[in-house]
Amino acid sequence: MSRFRLRPVLPSERALVYEWRNDPAVRRVMSNPHVVDPEVHKDWWQTAIADPQRRMMILDDADVPAALIVFFDLKPGSSANWGFYAGASRKSGADLLAMWVTVEVAAVAYAFEHLRLDELFCETLETNSAVLLLHDRTGFADSGQGQAGFIRKCFTRAGYELRRNGPIFAQLGDVVFEADPRDVSIPAPAIPTPARDQGPERRVSILGSANWDLVARDLGETYRNAIGHSLQVTAPAIGQYALELADAASPLRSNPPDSLIFAERFEDLAGDGNNAEARFEAYAGCIRAARAAMPGRFFINDFVPVCPRVRSIAEALTHQDAASRLAQSFNRELQSLASLLPDTQLVPLADLVLETGRRNSDPGKYWFLGRMPFGQALVDRWTSCVAGMLAAGEGRTVRVLVCDLDDTLWSGSAGEGGIGLDEAFLAVQRCLKTFAERGTLLAISSKNEEAAAFEALRRPDMVLREADFSALRINWRPKSENIRSIAAEIGVAENSLMVLDNDPLERAEIRHALPDAITPELPWDVADWPRFLVNHPLLTQLDVLSEDAGRRNAYRMKRMIGEEPNRESVLRSLGLTVEWKPVNPSTLPRAVQLAAKTNQFNTSSIRYSQADLERLRATGGQAWTVRLRDRFGGDELAGLAVMKFDPARQAAVIETILLSCRVLGRGLETATLAFLNEVAAQAGCQWLEGTIVETQRNQPCRDLYRNHNFDRVADGLFVRGIAGSTPIERPAWLTYL
C-alpha cells in the first residue's frame, strides 16, 4: 500500500490550510511574511478553489494531510507556476527534508503527467538555500529574475523525461495520484523495481575530499532502479579516506567493500596550482597502496576542470590553458596507473562533463554551502554511468533488445495505411544498429500482419533490415509469450532482455507476465530515445571485444545447427577448430568478461577477477581459454576452464568450465572435458573431480559430468578415474590445434 496520496483539496480543509499558512516557519519564506487575517484567507480560499487557472492539491502522508501544493497561472498543456507549504513545525531535520522531496517530485510528476505541461515555474526566496538546493537536485534550472528577492526557476518536459527514471523520482512508486476532475488523467504506468535473482548485497565506498553523502544515496537508488538489486553506498567523512586506507584496523580496511571509487576532483588536487603534482603523486600512491592491500574492484574518476576559470579564446579552442594542460597530464598518469593495476578502471568523468556541459557540472554556491562535488545534472549522469560500470562488471547487462515495430521503429501501422519514417525514427534505428554492431542482439516482437511488416522492413530507406534481427515474432499472440520464446530460441535468460515498446498497456502486460525482463518506460518524445538508450545503465559496455562484434553470426550459426536434422554433417561442414591456451595478458580481459557474463553453462558461477586468475598459478592451478574458429571467419574466445591440482590425493579438480551459450551444441563441452582429462593424466593424477554449483540459471550444465561417466560421490561432486579408464573421446567433427 502506498504511503502518500496527492489529491484535490477539500472545501472543508480551509481551516487546516489557514493554520499552515500562518505557521512562522512558512511565513518566513513567503513574499508576504505577515499573519493573514481569517477573513482575507476566507475570501482567497473561495476564489482560489473555483479558479479554472488554479489547482490546489493536498499531499496525504499515511492518510494524514501533510502539505498543500498550488498550481497557478495555469495554461493547460503549456505552463504553470507552483508553490507549496506545510505545517513545517511538525517535522524537523531529515524528516522535513524527506517530506519536501516527496512534495517536490509529486508536484513535478502531476504537472507533466496530468496537467500535460511543457514548463513548470517556481519562485523561491533567495535566502531559502535548502529549497533552492532541492529544486536544483530535482532538475529545476534558473529562469531569469523573479520578483525582488526571489529566484525564478523552470522545469521542462525534456528535463522530466530524462529524470523520471532517476533516483530522485524513484519514490513516485510510493505516491498515489487522484487527479482534479478538470485535468486529463493519464498517469505514467507504475515503474516497478525490476525483479532479479537476488544475491548478497553489494557494497561500494566513494573516496574523495568533497561531500559525497548525497551522491552516495543517488548512486544506490540509480543502481536499485536500473538493476533491481540493492547497493549499499557509503562515503567516509570529508578528508578522512586516506587515513582510513592507511589504517589496517579501520572499517574500510577490516571490512572492505566490493568496490572502491576514487573520486578526487581536479579542483581538489590542483588548488591554486602550487604543489599540484605533489598532491597528485600522493593520491596515486594512495591508490597503489590500497590496491596492494585490498580486494575488490577499483574505479577512478579521471580529471576535468568544472569550475569557472579565466582563459583566452585561443586557449579555450586548443585546451592549452594551465588547468586543461594539468588535467591532461594527470589523466595520462591515471591511464598508465589503471593499466598496471588489476581490476582497476577509469570512470570517464571528462566525457560526462562534455556531455552535460561545464556550467551544469559546476556545483557553484553549493560547493561553498556544503562541499557538494558537482552540479546535479552531472551527478545524475555520473551515477548512471557508474551504476552501469558496476552492472557490466557483474555480468548484468542487456544482451538482447526486443523491439516493437509500429510507432517504435517507424510511425504509424504497417498493416493500416502505411508507415512514416521521419528523422527521429531513423535516429532510433541507427542507434539500435550501432548496438547490434557492438554485440547486442536485436529481436522483434510485434502484433502485426507478417507480410505487411516484412514489406516495411524491406523498404530501401530502412536502416534496420531483416538480417539485423536474430529472432522475429510477428503475429497476434500476447507479446509476453513471444518474448519468452525469443529468450528460449536465442538461449538467454529473460533478465538479459530489454523490451522497447511504445504502448504503455503492452508494457504493463509484459511486466506482469515477465517480471524478470527489463521493460523500461520510454520518453514520450521519440527524439529522446537514442539518448535514453545510450545512457541506460544496463546497456553499458566496459569494452567492445572482437567476440562481441561477431555475436550475431554466432547465434545465426547456432540456429542453423539446431534446425538441421543431420546435425553431425552440418557441424562437419562448419570447419570448426578448437584451441585451448593458458590465460595470458592478451586474453585476460576476455576471460574476466566471460566469467562475469556467462550464467547458463557455468559449473561454478565464480566471478573471477583479473587478480583471481593471475593468482591461480601461485595456488597450484591453471586457467585456459577456449577458442573456437569456423570456416566463415568466426574466431571467438568462447569459454574458460579452471583446474587445480591436489598432489596429496593425486587428483585434478575442475573448478570451473564455462562456455558462451551461443556456442553450445557443437560438442565443445565434451572436447574441453577430454582436454582436461588429458592434462590431468599427463600430470600423473589418478582422479579427475568436478563440481556443479547449481544456480537458478545454469540448468544446461547440470548433467555435464553424469553424461561423461563421472560418478556422483556427494551433492554436486563428481569423480572419474583416469588410470585404466576409457579416455573421454574428442568429437570427430572438431579440428584441434
Image: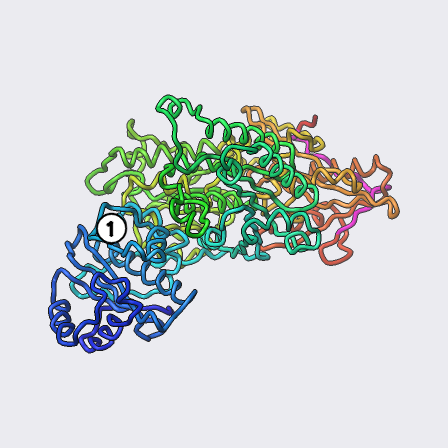
Find residue 324 and report its horizontal and vertical position in percent: 46, 29
- Asked whether 30 or 538 is in front, the reply is 30
In the picture, the quarter occupied by the C terminus is top right
- Asked whether 178 or 605 is in front, the reply is 178
Part of the protein shown in magenta:
718-734
Decide if residue 204 is on the left or right side of residue 341.
Answer: left
Whether 203 is drawn above or below 448: the answer is below
Whether 294 is drawn above or below 565: the answer is below
Residue at (41% x, 47% y) in the render: 380
Find residue 250 and report its horizontal and vertical position in percent: 67, 55
The residue wearing badge 1 is 152
Q: Number of marks in the image?
A: 1
Decide if residue 674 is on the left or right side of residue 416.
Answer: right
Whether 246 is drawn above or below 124: the answer is above
Residue 719: within the magenta? yes
- Asked whether 414 or 729 is in front, the reply is 414
From this viewpoint, which residue is outermost toward the right?
648
Q: Dot 1 surroundings within 10 Å: few (below 14), some, or many (20 or more)? A: many
Residue at (57% x, 50% y) in the render: 205
Q: Can see residue 667?
A: no
Decide if residue 452 is on the left or right side of residue 709.
Answer: left
Find residue 240 and report its horizontal and vertical position in percent: 59, 50
- Asked whether 408 or 492 is in front, the reply is 408
Find residue 475 and report its horizontal and vertical position in percent: 34, 46
Q: Give the quarter of the image for residue 4.
A: bottom left
Magenta span: chief secondary structure:
loop
Residue 134: within the magenta? no
In the picture, the quarter occupied by the N terminus is bottom left
Q: Can see residue 421?
A: yes
Residue at (58% x, 35% y) in the render: 280
